[in-house]
Amino acid sequence: MALNIESIKERIAELRKLEGVGSSSIPAILKSEGFTRRDFLKWAGAMTILLGLPSSFTPLVAEAAEVADRVPVVWLHLAECTGCSESLLRTDAPTIDNLIFNYINLQYHDTIMAAAGWQAETNYEEALQKFKNRFILCVEGGVPTKNNGQFLTIGPHAETGLEKLKRTAAEAAAVISVGTCSSFGGIQAAKPNPTEAKGVGEVLGRTVVNIPGCPPSAKNIVGTIVYYILFGALPPLDNFNRPKWAYGLRIHDLCERRGHFDAGEFVEEFGDQGAQNGFCLYKVGCKGPYTFNNCSRERFNQHTSWPVQAGHGCIGCSEPDFWDTMAPYEEPLAKHQFSSAMADSSADKVGITILTLAGVAVAAHGLISAIKNPKE
């Protein structure tokens, strides 16, 4: 993507002319929540780095975040538990990411909009007409496709989720799949997949930005929207259509327990001395070496913790078919070979790399561990 600063400035200037949400601007909302301008600019600087942009782009990223409420968003709920929305909305100490997410220009969202029934349907139709080819479509949930989608019907017209998705996506400027369900089908697509649930991109047959995770972080969603505001285009994607800036590294790469892995120090069973010492969780099922996400760097709950820090291994929830390929979750994958996502689909350079080196490393460290602990 060409980094044309002047075109970005023009894009942001045009967005500023549009109407935002309500009477308060995003900067005013952040201020009311106790965030100073300095806090916001620090956040913008961190987001600039995450997006892989030069530091000189920090002021532009800040401006793009400030006008995020000018970009219309239509949010569809399909086959899911609404956990992605719930995790982003229900927080007692919101971060800047959460607040920006909460105040983006949501024209339609099943869970948080006040309208219901026919009024909700009217709002939906008006949004499609008023913002045709301008709005971002965010989809939460997998897409049941069996029997022409009859396993999921929505609204007063009993329109199938499959129909509503296709009709909405046809009018959208960009489509973002929020969560693993919409990205890859979710638990609904686990074997034997009775409803033939699929990910949004597979159903639409077009490039869709996947933001997998159960749930994904607000930073990954907001960052993708900010990127689109800046460039009017989708970010560089891996071969599973995930933004490379967020999913370019394995969880294992930046894990705080990585040093113990390298030293051959593993938790053998939950609650043992190794667990108390914070040893590596690979032997009790951690899928971090096979999982691409930024959880180990960004964490959850206001950046305070994440599953591995809390004592349970990663279950690989941002990988396709993790419910089938990563189970059982408390046992190591051993010789399992897993496809790497390090391929650039945005440049049509799709490729698969088998992580055999990780398997060799695990075997070697297991041997070291056995030597250190002959009783094992």
Image (cartoon, helix red, strand yellow):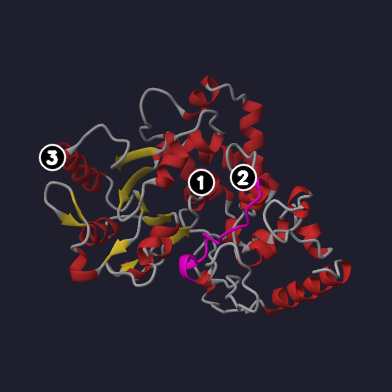
- Label 2 crowding class (10 Å Cα cut-off): few <14, some 14-19, many 20+? many
Q: Where is residue 16 in the image (x, y as percent from the top left)?
A: 44, 35
Location of residue 127 in the rendering, given as x and y in whole percent from the top left corner: 25, 43
> What residue is at 40 percent from the left and 59 percent from the top?
181
User: Where's residue 143, x and y in %?
Assistant: 30, 62
* Residue type of the residue flagged with mark 2: Met
Q: Distance between the residues labelled 3 and 1?
A: 33 Å
- Answer with mark 3 or mark 1, whichever residue precedes in sequence: 3
Of residues 226 and 359, which is closer to you in this image?
A: 359
Question: Is residue 280 among what the camera can see?
Answer: yes
> Alpha-carbon distance for marks 3 and 2?
40 Å
Q: CA separation, marks 1 and 2?
A: 9 Å
- Pointers 3 and 2 in contact (C-beta within 8 Å): no
Q: Residue 103: say if magenta.
A: no
Q: Are marks 1 and 2 in contact (CB under 8 Å)?
A: yes
Residue 104, given in percent of the width and then of the height, sits at 41, 38
Q: Name the residue under label 1.
A: 226
Q: Give the range drawn in magenta.
A: 310-324
User: Which element is circle 2 on?
Assistant: helix
Which residue in the structure is indicated by mark 2? 47
